[in-house]
Amino acid sequence: MKNKGFLNIALLSVLFAMFSLLLLDMDLSLAQEGGEVIASEDTTFQLPAPPTNVKAFDTPDDNGHSITVSWTLSADDGAGRNNVISYEIVRSDSPDGEFEVRGLAPAGENTFEDKGAKEKQDANYLPPHKDFYYKVRARGDGFFSVSEVSPPAHAFGQWYHTGKTPVVVAVLLFSTFCLVFITVARKGKKLYVRPLAGIEAVDDAIGRATEMGKPILYILGLGSADMIATIASFTILSRVAKKVAEYQTPILIPCCDPIVMAVAQETVRAAYLEAGRPDQYKEENIYYLTSMQFAYVAGVNGIMLREKPATNFYLGKFYAESLLLAETGSLAGSIQISGTDEIAQIPFFVAATDYTLIGEELYAASAYLGREPILLGTLKGQDWGKAVVMIALILGALAATFNFQFFLNLFSIQL
Amino acid sequence: MSGEVIGVWIGAILTLGIFSFLYKDNPFYKFSEALFVGVSAGYWFVVTFWQYFLPKLIDNLVLAYTVLTVEGKIDYHWVYLLGGGLGVLMLLRLLPNVGWLSRWSLAFIVGTTAGLQFTRYLESNGIIQVKGTILPLIVGGNLNTTIGNIIIVVGTFCGLIYFFFSKEHKGAFGGAARVGVWFLMITFGALFGYTVMSRMSLLIGRLDYLFSNWLGLIG
């Protein structure tokens, strides 16, 4: 009996325990179920408000492969629930089609430039004159709220970049100055050009080489033929070559660019022709060495030591090789005339050569040597351009001091 | 001896060959120089072929031809024929009778780039510089900035006067030009020191190659 009572108690205990566990399990599942509902409701509740007023339009002042999208910020961006992380901009070629992501904009931004490639074979190609539709998604924590579809927009190129108007004004002003003074010079009025020591020494340097019976070395620098300094150097070379032809002094021109070499050959050939000595022109003296900077230096240094030129000209675009060349020329005992618009190299030329044309003096030298109306008129026009700059500088400084923003905006250029 | 070791030895010997120029011109320098110039010229030819000629000309013309045959359209890539044609004209320099045709290519290069650079220079070297120099002459509560701004404005103004070529530098104008020269020379002095330091790093690089890669004396 005792045992039977014990078994009953044990059975009841087990049943009670199972019932308790069942109840506990039911409580747990109820709690989880309730949690899910709340979480779900909470998540729905936390979706940011969608952006509104989405507009797409051609990006102004471009080549026609970009569309700008603008929108009104979500009500929950910086306000409300303040839960917008970013905006996702999507695009399709039809309002009901599949939209692809084009980019992201951070919260607080309300514009995006959908910039495509101009090459057809590029995966990112954005064809001009084709309509596109945009949507903007406000992104919360893993959820989006999507805007309405924008009206269609297409990209197209502009012929005039409104952000470059100051450049147009400057070009017109500068060109007018040059044309006016070229006309004045052509009418026979003498235009004054102040002496430049480096240029005045050119004739003496060529004369020295002639007397010594040694060649002249002319270095056009490391620039390509499309650089202004190299182009200026060609015009000086023309004058130097004409003198050289008259004096019958050999001129050596090792080049580091094949195009520069070809232009130099044509320039010198024309100068010899002008001097009435085409038979004296030797094309083999104007040759290509190499395009590699320090290999070129090694080659030119060798020429300096072996040919012992009486005069070295370094006129054009120079980089780290400037001092290496000028020092070797100095050791070889040559008279040296240098000029470059590369500001970092001018100090080395000033230190190691006899005469240096600083920056714009290089451009002015050709006018000084030639004395032709076009060059002199251009030089005078440049001076007037500088005068305008100086006036702008003074007025600008005063405007900045007294905070006249209008004047400062005149010089704003959209890059 | 591995290829890398041989390369280091060749590099080190040629470096010493170029350095021997510091003593005087000698056969060792001449050999190194000729090798350097020759190899670099050959290298640039290969670089030009693979980086310019092939991708810029041949690939674009192949693309234009493909578009023509597949889509039946004349693609804008045919414009590269113009560049190719100008290149052929340059090669005609090798033929004395028609060599003058290369002047067309040269005229195109020099003329086009001069025109393009005109607006670019006016923008970057003109207007943007002017805008950058327009500074307030008095900055309240900041004496350093005030002095700095005045120096920039005065220095730029006087520097521009120095570069006036059509007026004699006499009197007050000449005085301002002399101030401009002072500004220029101080700037050049600072640039000189700065650039010398960067050249020292080139020398250190070469010495590091000799003492580290070649002789193994350093680290």
Image (cartoon, coloured by chain):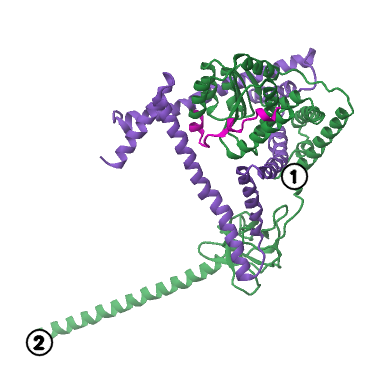
Magenta-colored stretch includes residue A291: yes
Mark 1 lies on a secondary structure that is helix
SS for callout 2? loop
Q: Amino acid at mark 1?
A: Lys
Amino acid found under the numbered disc labelled 2 = Met
Rendered purple, the chain in question is: B
Mark 1 Cα within 10 Å, few/some/many (few <14, many 20+)? some
Number of numbered discs? 2
**Which chain is indicated by disc 2?**
A
Measured along the vertical axis of the image, is residue B155 above or below residue A15? above
Vertical placement of A207 versus B74: above or below?
A: above
Q: Residue at x 87, y 29 (%)?
A: A186
The tag earlier along the polypeptide, 2 or 1, is 2
Residue A160, percent across and down?
Answer: 77, 51
> Which residue is at 65% across, 24% downward?
B148
What percent of the width, then of the height, locates residue A123?
Answer: 56, 62
Image side of residue A2 versus residue A174, left or right: left
- On the question of residue B84 being in view, the answer is yes
- Considering the image in quadrants, where does the C terminus of chain A appear? top right
User: Which one is in front, B29 or A215?
Assistant: A215
Tell us which disc is closer to us: 2 or 1: 1
State which region is magenta: A277-297
**Discs 2, 1 touching: Cβ within 8 Å:** no
Q: Which mark is residue A1?
A: 2
Residue situated furthest top in the rendering: B171
Q: Are marks 2 and 1 on the same chain?
A: yes
Image colour assigned to chain A: green
Q: Position of residue A244 (x, y in %)?
A: 67, 23
The residue at which mark 1 appears reads as A164
Query: Residue visible at 44% across and 28% down?
Result: B201
Parent chain of label 1? A
